[in-house]
Image (tube, grey):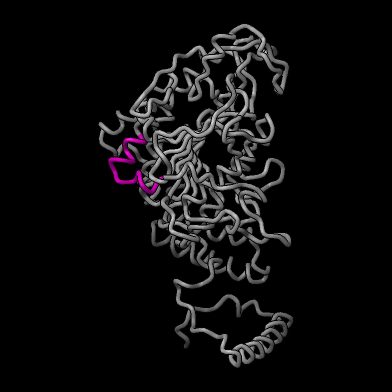
Amino acid sequence: MSHHKPDLEHLFLNRRELLKRCGTGLGMLSLSAMLGEEGMLGSAASADTLPNALHPLAPRAPHFPGKVKRVIHLFMNGGPSQVDTFDPKPMLTQYHGKPLPASLSTERKTGAAYKSPFAFKKYGKSGIEVSEIFPNVAQHVDDLCIIRSMHADVPNHEPSLMLLNCGDSQKERPSMGSWVLYGLGTVNQNLPGFIVMCPGGYPIKEGNNWRSAFLPGIYQGTYINTANSRIDQLIENIKNSDLDSKQQRQQLDLVQEMNRHHEQLHQQDAQLEARIQSMELAYRMQMEATDAFDISKEPQSVRDRYGSGTQARQTLIARRLAERGVRYIQVWHGAGQPWDNHEDIETNHRMLAKQCDQAIGALLTDLKERGMWEDTLVIWGGEFGRTPVVELQAKANGRDHNHWGYTTWLAGGAVKGGYVHGATDDFGFKAVEKPVHVHDLQATILHTLGFNHEKLTYRYAGRDFRLTDVEGSVVHELLA
């Protein structure tokens, strides 16, 4: 009697499959002989050197040594106003209520200049001015690399979200987090390498913001609804109430073996491969994820530092995920109530900033104290900015969309601290000095991780695709 585990593949082998495999085998014998004569056959691959398709999340080296190992993307959904946050414009006060000297190319009809309702103050040794609505972030201004000359392509949410997150405003492309995970793999096989925390449901364009598109499905972002605070609500089916760990392992092994057989019959189907990998990851996550998302394990002093509320909780979780090896963590703010303030901007921007300011300041402090500052990149910003004039369609106390010029800031050991890059015009409408396109930002982010953005590619439909499409340049002036 054989003591070997039965191979399901043998049980399902029909005549056609037998002939196909025999034919393939003869061809491989010929190929082996030819390669051997040319000295092109190497030694057998070890488990650590198998193709990435077999170990899709294994850690991989970038093109060159990068300063950054992980990214925390604080995404302000809806488009925060640059002239009310990090790009003060005194000329708006002078022209308040008056037409601006030059016509502005805006999405909808707009009115007179609208001064910021918030006071700006200089902070730190750098003396960079920050709005009063971000007092905690302002304490770290000497650590911030503030880009005041960002610009995108169009003043609409959907294409601008896709451009920032996925590199193309119209076509479905892999998200930035998926590209990072594809390039680097992950150091923690018990957690997803790319996690998206978005409270209150999906935003505009939903899961397209963090999808893997034509990259293998294992590189897609894992969505977490952080409006929930209980672990079993944050992550569905995190516990099996009927089977213990050993029984689950046996059950999963059987299902995975059948899936592998089915996959071989269907020529390495990408969706099936993603499903197989996801099932395995879900099993391994049961202990690790429960710990990572449980902020009650943090000292009370740390929780107090971050503050209360959903945004504070998910920002603290972001730090916990980062120190556990998650490569790319995107923290959404304003998914349910966005920064898209066409009216009542004074009330709404103040409220939204209050929800996240303390937690962001705490995160920057935490990264330094835990020795994570040098190899973490923090990104703050939205998909575009807002106009320096009022929008007439609303109550004339808000701002319309503006893709011509807005602010994004970076922080961490890879970028210059206390540095302002570029500038908008006197009214904060258009980038006029050292403009930085979204593709330039993406190229720079990949550079901090050790990648040449032109070489981090994936072949699909007959061409090599990349995050930055056919554009983008690294902005070396941002780098430390």
Residue 103 drawn at (x, y percent): 71, 18
Is 344 drawn above or below residue 42 in the view shown?
A: above
Residue occupying the point 68% across, 83% down? 21
Name the image quarter holding residue 316.
top left
Depth order, front residue of 392/207: 392
Residue occupying the point 37% across, 41% down? 319
Q: Is residue 313 left or right of residue 429?
A: left
Depth order, front residue of 204/249: 204
State whether residue 135 appears in this view: yes
Magenta-highlighted residues = 363-376
Residue 327 drawn at (x, y percent): 45, 50
Name the image quarter holding residue 344.
top right
- Position of the C terminus by quadrant: top left
Is 65 drawn above or below residue 156 in the view shown?
A: below
Is 260 drawn above or below residue 225 in the view shown?
A: below
Residue occupying the point 66% across, 79% down? 13
Name the image quarter holding residue 378.
top left
State whether residue 335 appears in this view: no
Whether residue 56 appears in magenta in the rendering, the answer is: no
Residue 84 drawn at (x, y percent): 51, 19
Q: Is residue 467 left or right of residue 88?
A: right
Residue 38 drawn at (x, y percent): 60, 90
Q: How many marks?
A: 0
Is 214 drawn above or below residue 97 in the view shown?
A: below
Residue occupying the point 61% across, 50% down? 467
